[in-house]
Amino acid sequence: MSGGTLVHLEHRGPVAVVTLDNPPVNAMGAAVRVALKAALDAAMADPAVDAAVLTGAGKHFSGGADIREFGAPPVDGPTLVGIINAVETMPKPVVAAIHGTATGGALELALACAHRIATEDAELGLPEVTLGFVPGAGGTQRLPRLVGVPRALDMILTGRRVSGAEAQAIGLVDETAPAAQLLDAAVALAMRAAGGAVRRTCDLPVPATPADVFTRAEADLAKTARGRVAPGAALECVRQATTMPFAEGLKAEREAFLGLVRGPESTALRHVFFAEREAQKVPDLGAGAVSSNIRRVGVVGFGTMGAGIAISFAAAGYQVAVVDETAEALERGLARVRSTFEEARQKGRISEEECAARIARVSAGTDYGAFADADLVVEAAFEEMDIKHAVFAKLDAVCRPDAILATNTSSLDVNVIAAATRHPARVLGLHFFSPANIMKLVEVVRPQQVAPEILAVCLDVVKRIGKVGVVVGVCDGFVGNRMLFAYRRQADFLLEEGALPAQVDRVLRDFGMAMGPFQTGDLAGLDISWRIRKRLAATRPKELRYSPIADRLCEMGRLGQKTGAGWYRYEKGSRTPVPDPEVDALVKSVSAELGFTRREISDEEIIDRCMGALVNEGALILEEGLAARPSDIDVIWVHGYGFPRHRGGPMHWADHAGLVRLLDTVDAMHASQGPLVRPSALLRRLALDGGRFADLAKSGGAKEKA
Ligand code: NAD
């Protein structure tokens, strides 16, 4: 075996085997490219070599280009696109032997090889659009030549990965082989191909394409890629594969790639990609990876949240014991577990055996003794401190001293819950969002006494159940809901001053939010926050501005979708919000009652005020040390609140929208609304110094020193 450490070259008879070896995923950064080019050139120049096999060491073929290089200044040396084009025109056939993942540039490299062979469970995909650009090394030109336009569009526009088995069925790979025989089979395939004319993907015609394929794909994108640029650009590239000669199509694709890769969409999407990884690190634990030994999970309460939490753990393979107080609750909870998994089976998402196994993993009863062997217990009982105390006292008595105890409370003080237990170092909050089996976000709430390792274990468990965990400090509403209150309040005030719900919702939807705030309220039900407001009414400072519109709606019995009317009305059986003159009249009468002269509210003002309040609250949270990094807040808002991923989350968006302008809006809101909008000192400092939230990560923290 010869070659550098990043790429090995060895010989199997007349076949040169070139192996990428850059753990963990054989990413093809600058140094790998130099070594790869050298190995391939050596193989081609060697008269004893008739063909080559290209493969990856370890678990994967390759994850493709090194994402950190995108958006950075170009480096000297061979480019991936240069290597890929060279591979296609090499005088001897090159066979790609694929196991694990072959994504992005790695799949583009494989597409340029003469032949491909894969394990059945390999994963092949072109995820570029999910990072805001198009495949830039021939993917959009070669894939349609191998699998046809409809299948190429399906993969390229969504970033969907196909298995090795599916890849063979659609003609993306020539053969499949078991992992243990992959290399032997690839060498045999290379020997069969040697000597004959080398098959070049670029010479294949694009299979005839049904006329309406592109129009249908465009219509789909209008729904699924609202406000996005990359998917439409990728569609154009594939269309060009059908209208242009290969070399021209390649050139057009490259131009599209270069135009997008440093643009705002890609910058934002790459930011979120790295933010999600960064959020996995507990700051005071350094980079130390902690992996959990959690197998058995307990859940207290089989209500709305408890059932969703139990479903999430059971689906990921954990044994789940649920305890509730009444037989009805247990019956209802188990029925929900069963129906959720049955539905997944009926839709073909899981097999019959998997469905049965998931249901069997959940046991339910009234005896807390079921938690004796639990490694983690998540409490989701009623939202009352006395009940939480009683539950944790019982958990203290029955659980092992090393079991982790978590509360799903959304509004109670986790420090108080923890302090009343015997081992507060193992007590924390795991704040799931409703519906808990669907929503990805989990706030990992950090009370004062919890051990950092416990946070790390919980982040790991949250990831294993397919969710995104972010560590947050203890405060009213934690990070996500606290920011939501500030944002929502401006939406309400805008109504009093002259806007209507449909305008506010339209503007924020056009900004990219999954839903407008009033539409969201109707979906969630308006009575939950009404109950909280009624509880807090006695202590609310009367001199502060307060919008009574939501209370009036509830008093009218308009509780949202479930009552057929809320901020909008809903036709029977429909979830489509229809603006309602009755609500508009209510809004106008409240304006008059409060002495507002209604005025035209511009769309711009809606964005400025809602986003200004949101970002300012995020900055206050950073100052108070309740989130470790601005990017953690971005992850929370992208995964828990429908903030558009392609805008990178509120703090990333603010950096790019301009902090000076946001600060001006925040100051103006403070001038008219007083302490309801408390301008953040951090936001002011950054705005005045020409700084950015993104710089805080580098300067080592966000906490403002007073
Ligand atoms: P829920 O009323 O639907 O369910 C609570 C369940 O807990 C009931 O089945 C009840 O019988 C059971 N229970 C009450 N006391 C118990 C005890 N001592 N031992 C065992 N079981 C007991 O409530 P929910 O909406 O699922 O909320 C549960 C918790 O999750 C609350 O703390 C809530 O604040 C929090 N939360 C709710 C949401 C949401 O959107 N619903 C979101 C995040 C967090």
Image (tube, grey):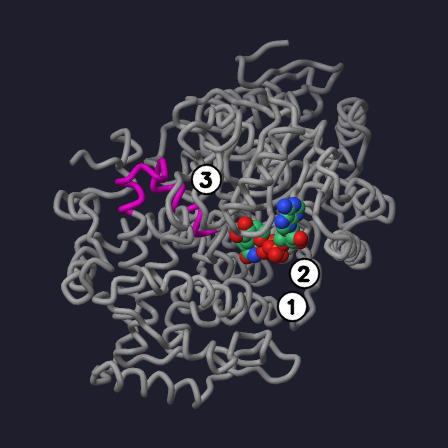
Foreground residue among 274 and 145: 274
Q: Residue at x 48, y 47 (%)?
A: 131
Give the magenta-colored segment's residue range: 619-638
Amino acid at dot 2: Pro
Of the two numbered discs 1 and 3 on the same chain, state the one appearing first in sequence.
Answer: 1
Q: Secondary structure at mark 1?
A: helix
**Where is 292 relative to 312, above or below?**
above
Q: Nearer the viewer, mark 3 or mark 2?
A: 3
Q: Residue at x 46, y 54 (%)?
A: 252
**Where is 21 relative to 29, above or below?**
above
Q: Nearer the viewer, mark 1 or mark 3?
A: 3
> Would you say residue 641 is visible in this rendering?
yes
Disc assigned to residue 434: none
Of the two numbered discs 1 and 2 on the same chain, state the one appearing first in sequence.
Answer: 2
Q: Is residue 633 magenta?
A: yes
Disc 1 to disc 3, C-alpha distance: 54 Å
Amino acid at dot 1: Val
Disc 1 to disc 2, C-alpha distance: 7 Å
Of the two numbered discs 3 and 2 on the same chain, state the one appearing first in sequence.
Answer: 2
Q: Secondary structure at mark 3?
A: helix
Disc 3 to disc 2, C-alpha distance: 52 Å
Foreground residue among 399 and 471: 399
The residue singled out by tag 2 in the image is: 150
- Cβ atoms at labels 1 and 2 below 8 Å apart: yes
Answer yes or no: disc 3 within 8 Å of ligand 1: no
Q: Quadrant of the C terminus?
A: top left
| Residue 309 position in % (x across, y down) | 64, 46
Disc assigned to residue 414: 3
Crowding near the residue tagged with mark 3, few <14, some 14–19, many ≥20 C-alpha atoms within 10 Å: many
Q: Secondary structure at mark 2?
A: helix
